[in-house]
Image (cartoon, rainbow, N blue to C red):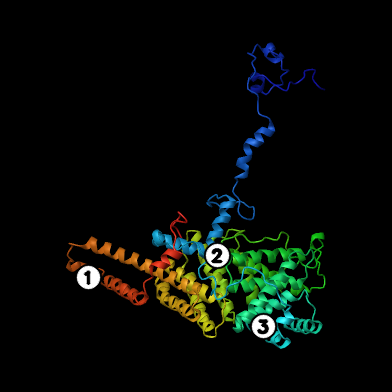
Amino acid sequence: MYSDRQRSRKACISCRERKRKCDGGLPCTYCLRNEHECAYEHTRRKKKMQRYLDRKPQLQTSPTDGEGTSPKPGMAVEPKNQSQLRLLEANSPAVFVRRLGLKMNPAVAPRLNCYAWNLGSHKEIACLPPASCITEILTLTEMHELASIYFAEVGPVYNFVDREEVDNAIVKRWLHQLPYDPIDSLLCGVAALGCVFGRMSSALETQLVHRARIALEHSSQLASPEVDQVVGWLLRVIYLRLTSSPHATWMASCTLMHMIETTKLHFEPASDSILAQSTEPGCLPERRRRIYCIAQLFNTWVSLDCGKSQVDLRGASSQLPETSWTTDQRELCRLSDFLTPKTDRDYDELETELFNLCTLEPAHPMMQLLQCNIGLCLYRRVRALGRTMSDDALDTLMDLADKALKAVDGLVRISSPWWHIVNIPFQLVCIFLVTDHTQSLTRLSEALQTLKLVADRYDTSIARESYDIAQLLVRQQRQRRYDELRSLDHALHGHEETSNASTYGQKGDDDSEGAFSAADGIFGSYPVLNGSLFDQFLLNNLFNDTAI
């Protein structure tokens, strides 16, 4: 049975404290009957929505990790945008080198730059001159020869183009002699890379590159480009990674990913989404996976190296190739995705993946350099956590370094101009300096000598710059050590050594002297840098943070 009393939307203080119904009168019926003092608050109570809005900033700053789950106990709270920026910096060897230089000597620290990006043996013309048809640039025999070089050098490392399909396309293209064909960008890309690895005429290579650029520019404007045109973009990215600047390579890799999205190659054929319906239903699933995975691989690593964002294709369902890739190729691709900045990784995860990485045994020297590059990125991620590697993990990393330096030496001797033959020795010099461990310092001489071998063999400005910057960093580290030794000598000045002192730690003193003698032997033979290098390549204080 309902009461005749009506409840007011505003209760007096007495009724609210006693949790009684209040009719809103002044005085209200309850206070009048019980002779209580009846009064009302003059300030209005906040509405529910206002209370929610007041709490909203707290809700938004609730800590979560990259997957949207609560952090582990004791984990520091970090805004998501700062976490992603930190991971971008941790992945980038360019940032690593800059911080290394700032720690040693901020006045002459190398500027933020992708040193040792590639050999720098090619210069592209900015404008696009009139281009001839590919059948006018090359004869059928020349095209087959360049394709053979491509499949001997590039095919074993990046397996996404089938030899039989390319051979058939070549025959068909030279048979019909059309002014333009969608296959042109693919064939020009194969031929251009054949010129690079076959050390062919630069004039011929330039014609092929410009013809490919025109064809690719046209394909980027099509609403429904063909898969062969997407492959042409992928070949273009590989060519730029070998010959051009980091920015040009990154831009092309981003365009490539958007071409992937346009042709729906990032979806599995079985997907029932309307957006996943492919414009190329005849493209076999295994070929789709190879094209997508290698395109993503390049976009990921170019972005990581440059410290820039990669293209994230939402809803991608493509799997790793099942039958056409080796276990090593699949694992290297998986580990590359593991290192993307979209998810933070803890120390245990990073160390576990380093051990998994070292179980791989890729046969091709370039694959060994790719393996080492992933290991070095794992090391930088560990450093970014403020941790040092365990002895076992460091031993594993040193084994990777030894194998990589041998691979570089072999590739240089056969004049195989992969970008990592200059990039990996340069990174290793920096890693060895930062690690500052006996194992790493004993390998520093070999890494620097390997970098010198590359610079002497190719004698390009980029290779020479990489070698000079590596020397600079080593000399700065040596100078720091000498300054520390002089400080210790100054502290001992005027203190005579006692007989007991010779008993305690004499062995350690001898070891110290031997260490510096060894350092002189390692670094003393390299020439001093001239002032022009400082003027051209060194800038001051790009970053305030000198931690590495």
* Badge 3 density bin: few <14, some 14–19, many ≥20, Cα 10 Å: some
Q: CA distance from mark 2 to mark 3?
A: 34 Å
Q: Is residue 432 left or right of residue 174?
A: left
Residue for point 65% across, 66% down:
253
Lower position in the chain sequence, tag 3 or tag 1: 3
State the SS at label 1.
helix
Return the mark for residue 503: 1
Disc nearest the viewer among 2 and 3: 3
Disc nearest the viewer among 3 and 1: 3
Residue underneath mark 2: 350
Lower position in the chain sequence, tag 2 or tag 3: 3
Q: Is residue 401 above or below residue 535?
A: below
The picture places residue 69, in percent across and down from the top left corner, at: 63, 52
State the SS at label 3.
helix
Residue underneath mark 3: 151
State the SS at label 2.
helix
Quick one: which residue is furthest to the front in this view? Answer: 130
What amino acid is labelled 2 in the image? Leu
